Amino acid sequence: MPDSPAPAPWYVYMLECTGDLLYTGVTPDVAQRFEKHRSGRGAAFTRINPPLRVLAALACENRSAALKAEAALKKRRRPAKLAWVRENPWPT
């Protein structure tokens, strides 16, 4: 029996938003999700504080792992979040 393809990864990502604010979320497609945020169809936070760019993203094995990574990241203070950004830069 042939091996089934590996499931597509989910990503935890961080956006830079207006007002020097950071937004963290999860998605299977970072570029598509960023465009939703930019168009006002994303989270309420990004409708109020429009996103400027994707700062970083980290591939996770599945949605559950991405949600756990997101929760842990959201608990960090800003300097630790920025260190995470430096470790996981998004291609520009």
Image (spheres, grey):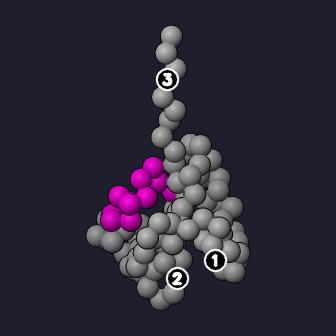
**32 inside magenta stretch:** yes
How far from the left and from the top, in percent, is residue 2? Answer: 49, 15
Identified by mark 3, the residue type is Ser
Left or right of residue 10, residue 39 in this image? left
**Circle on res. 4:** 3
How far from the left and from the top, in percent, is residue 84? Answer: 65, 69
Q: Which circle, 2 or 3, is nearer the viewer? A: 3
Check the image and name the residue furthest to the front: 91
Q: Of 7 and 87, which appears nearest the observer?
A: 87
Q: Look at the image and tell me whether residue 81 can be seen.
A: no
Q: Name the N-terminal-most of marks 1 and 3.
A: 3
SS category of the residue bearing label 3: loop
**82 inside magenta stretch:** no
Residue behind mark 1 = 82
Identified by mark 2, the residue type is Leu
How far from the left and from the top, in percent, is residue 74? Answer: 64, 68
For image coordinates 65% across by 53% down, the residue present is 68
Mark 1: give few (<14), some (14-19) or many (20+) Cα within 10 Å: some
Q: Name the N-terminal-most of marks 2 and 3.
A: 3
Q: Name the N-terminal-most of marks 1 and 2.
A: 2
* Numbered range of the magenta stretch: 26-36
For image coordinates 65% across by 67% down, the residue present is 87
**Circle on res. 21:** 2
Task: Tell me: residue 51, above or below residue 35.
Answer: below
Q: Which circle, 1 or 2, is nearer the viewer? A: 1
Picture quadrant of residue 42: bottom left
User: Which secondary structure type mostly characterizes the magenta part of the structure?
Assistant: helix
Identified by mark 1, the residue type is Leu
Q: How many angstroms separate mark 1 from mark 2 (CA)?
A: 11 Å
Q: Are marks 2 and 3 in contact (CB under 8 Å)?
A: no
Q: Of 67 and 14, which appears nearest the observer?
A: 14
**Circle on res. 7:** none
